[in-house]
Amino acid sequence: MNIKEMTKLSLCTALICVSSYIVIPLPFTPIMITGQTMAVNLIALILSPVHSAICIMAFILLGASGLPVFAGGSSGLGVLFGQTGGFILGFLFAAVAISFLKGKKASLSRYLLVTIFLGIPIIHLLGAAYMGYILNITYIKALQLGVIPFLAGDLIKAVLACIIAVRLNNYLIS
């Protein structure tokens, strides 16, 4: 790994950590609106699959070790094994999948397809399944609490991440 790649990984890890502090709590759900989904999409679109995995794993390990990098400055294994842990795990799988299928050439339409129809569903489906298990609620109830209120915002964040990624990738490649 060269200096340029290490710098990109460090900046992307910092990006997802900082995006965790952009929070809007909702009174009817234990899940908060954060900037994390936008950061995950952006990371996946500008890094390779392996580097995306390393970046998200670094974020997870930082949070698990006690650094306040999860949503709202939370941290620890309790968060990973708590009601939002499935979403954090979903970040890892979504980032790798998006990065793997984004293609070699910066393409807004392809980026939108993989983030909206692959990345967001992976994050939400894993998150809702785990949240339902932890809270001992039905999968439908978990979808109502942890997915449906966030779909419109996640679509907007995915579009913004795709637009930024196209510009960044065109700049980084040239």
Image (cartoon, grey):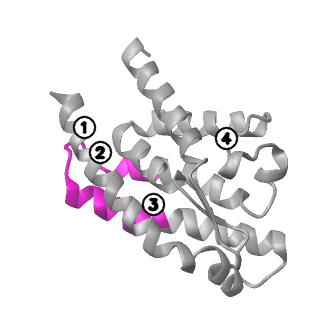
Residue shown at 71%/61% (left/top)?
84
Marks 1 and 3, the one that precedes in the sequence: 3
Write down the residue under mark 1.
169
Q: Tell me the SS state at disc 3.
A: helix
Q: Which residues are magenta?
A: 97-120
Q: Between marks 2 and 3, how big is the CA–CA gap?
A: 15 Å
Residue in view at x 69 percent, y 79 percent: 142
- Across and down, in percent, residue 89 comes to 64, 53
Instruction: Assign the C terminus to one quadrant of the image.
Output: top left
- Quadrant in the rendering for residue 112: bottom left
| 95 versus 126 height, above or below | above
Is 110 in the magenta? yes
User: Which residue corresponds to mark 3?
Assistant: 119
Judge the density around disc 2: few (<14), some (14-19), many (≥20) Cα neighbours within 10 Å: many
Badge 4 or badge 2: first in the primary sequence: 4
In 3D space, how far apart are the residues under numbered discs 2 and 1 (Cα atoms)?
A: 6 Å
Q: Residue 165: which disc? A: 2
92 in magenta: no
Q: Which mark is residue 69?
A: 4
Q: CA distance from mark 1 to mark 4?
A: 26 Å
Q: Is there a contact, CB below 8 Å, between mark 2 and mark 1?
A: yes
Q: Secondary structure at mark 1?
A: helix
169 w.r.t. 86: above or below: above
Where residue 169 sits, quadrant-wise, is top left
Rendered image quadrant of residue 170: top left
Residue 140: percent from left, percent from top? 67, 86
